[in-house]
Image (cartoon, rainbow, N blue to C red):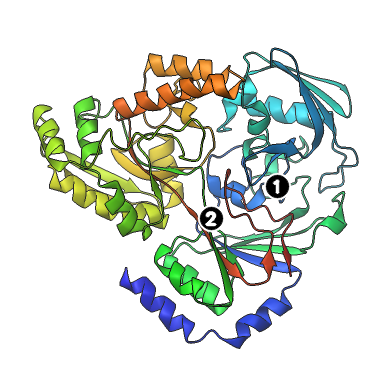
Amino acid sequence: MRKFWYAALAVAALAGTPLAADAQAKKDAVALGIVLEPPVLDPTVNPAAAIGEVVHYNLFETLTRIHENGTVGPLLADSWTPSADGKTWTFKLKSGVKFHDGSAFSSADVKSSFTRYGADGSTNKNKATFSNMEKIETPDAQTVVITLKATDAYFPFRIGENTAVITSDKTAADNSTKPVGTGPFKFDSWTKGSSITLVKADTYRDPAAIKLNKLTFKVIADPAAAVAALLAGDVDAFPTMGAYETVDQFKKDGRFTVTVGSTEGETLLSINNKRKPFDDVRVRRAVSYALDRQGIIDGAMSGFGIPIGSHFPPHNPAYVDLTKVYEYNPDKAKALLKEAGAVGTEITLRLPPPPYARRSGEIIATLLTDVGFKVKIENLEWAAWLDQVFKNRNFDMTIISHVEPNDINIYSTKVKPGYYFNYENPKFEDLIAKAEATVDPEARKPLLQDAQKILAEDAVNGFLFVLPKVSIYKKGLKGLWQNAPIFVNDMTAVYWE
């Protein structure tokens, strides 16, 4: 990791008063560094979290808004009322809303958007939310009535996620490259491999509330380059900094603010459960015993991250600490591998670009080799990872953070048929179905806790840690989120002091 320190120290010597001058010159603009370039700019057709980091709430809007503390409030809908059984929801829409092309927003746009997202052929990663809609009625331009087939305890939250942004039929086909929404910023330009620029929308209903005129999202995948860009003033903020070893350096630099918050990002050593020998639970358990979670956190994350033992974030009220189910025990791992006849199994560990994945992968490869696996690392670019691993399930193991909230249901084939883990357990599926139909959080809690225990018992994946949100930005920049209940860079309330 020394090269990251050397790069930071070299650039630090060049960074002085020009940084302060640059901040003064950008009172109506912000340049943000992002690790991953979105493959497209339409979050309703592609599962990449990087899309929402650019467009969610900035360019596209939803009926509800998820706040930084995880609560749900109004956005395009001023209010909503559920029926007694939780199956029918009546939304009263905000008036005076326009799309960036000047056309008026109405209930018809809500109906057409949700119908498209749940239709056959839809690639919306939350398709199940929309296919659960039995009917969508529009009694007038400002009212939408949605009747669900099955009660969804998380419904107001789900329609505040980026998969539920409201789009127009007129422009939907081009949203991947020329997105048109109702948000305070509109699309300006996209230089592939470099940056995406949004500018303040003259169609926005409350222009005085938006203090910035321009947003530039600069793609900087390399941690050393991210440090250099901040120190040189090329970016004003890195909302999700991956170079954790540099945090102390920035804390000591009076030109910057550093915050450390929580996320919903369960980081996993994901396993293909139907690929031999990982279809044998003994082999998967051997993998779990081989993982030194704290050692991985210390080595790959500079100590940032909270260990987890199942697919659930520790800040959730329903969390169960299952980290002791598979405490680091290489001897047990070796014994299980021998029992399963899997000593010497060759593994290809296919890694996406984020630093947490690449750095964790190097450590995990050593840990797995030590207990009897033969490990080969293959580094993939983001598009290749999505195609080979996520879409076509052509992998043994990978490392990825699952950042969507309330997403323990991805292990249910009823919710996510053909999901890339290739995991099936009818008992788990029944528990999830009951939990998602239980509106009362206290009644839902034991169901979610039992579901966590099943995933741990089955050792579906190697559960590592929750991804931290480390943000570094220039002094004087206000309004950025510290925590991330969803992965979004909401710039609607950001301003220069």
Quarter of the figure that contains the C terminus: bottom right
Q: Residues within 10 Å of mark 1 (few under 14, many from 20)?
A: many
Q: Residues within 10 Å of mark 2 (few under 14, many from 20)?
A: many
Quarter holding residue 85: top right
Q: Position of residue 73 (x, y in %)?
A: 73, 38
2 or 139: which is nearer to us?
2
491 to the left or right of 195:
right
Q: Is residue 363 above or below residue 426?
A: below
Q: Which residue is found at the position 14% from the left and 31% from the top?
A: 336
Res. 72 visible in picture:
yes
Q: Position of residue 370 (x, y in %)?
A: 14, 48
Q: Position of residue 398 (x, y in %)?
A: 34, 43
Q: At label 2, which amino acid type do we have?
A: Glu
Q: Nearer the viewer, mark 2 or mark 1?
A: 1
481 or 97: which is nearer to us?
481
Label 2, label 1: how far apart the Cα atoms are: 18 Å
Q: Which residue is mark 2?
A: 37
Sequence-wise, which precedes: disc 2 or disc 1? 2
Q: Which residue is found at the position 59% from the left and 55% from the top?
A: 482
Q: At label 1, which amino acid type do we have?
A: Tyr
Q: Position of residue 106 (x, y in %)?
A: 85, 33
178 to the left or right of 455:
right
Quarter of the figure that contains the N terminus: bottom left
Q: Which residue is mark 1?
A: 57
185 to the left or right of 343:
right
Res. 40 visible in picture:
no
In the structure shown, which secondary structural element does the residue marked by tag 2 occupy?
loop
In the structure shown, which secondary structural element does the residue marked by tag 1 occupy?
loop
Marks counted in the figure total 2
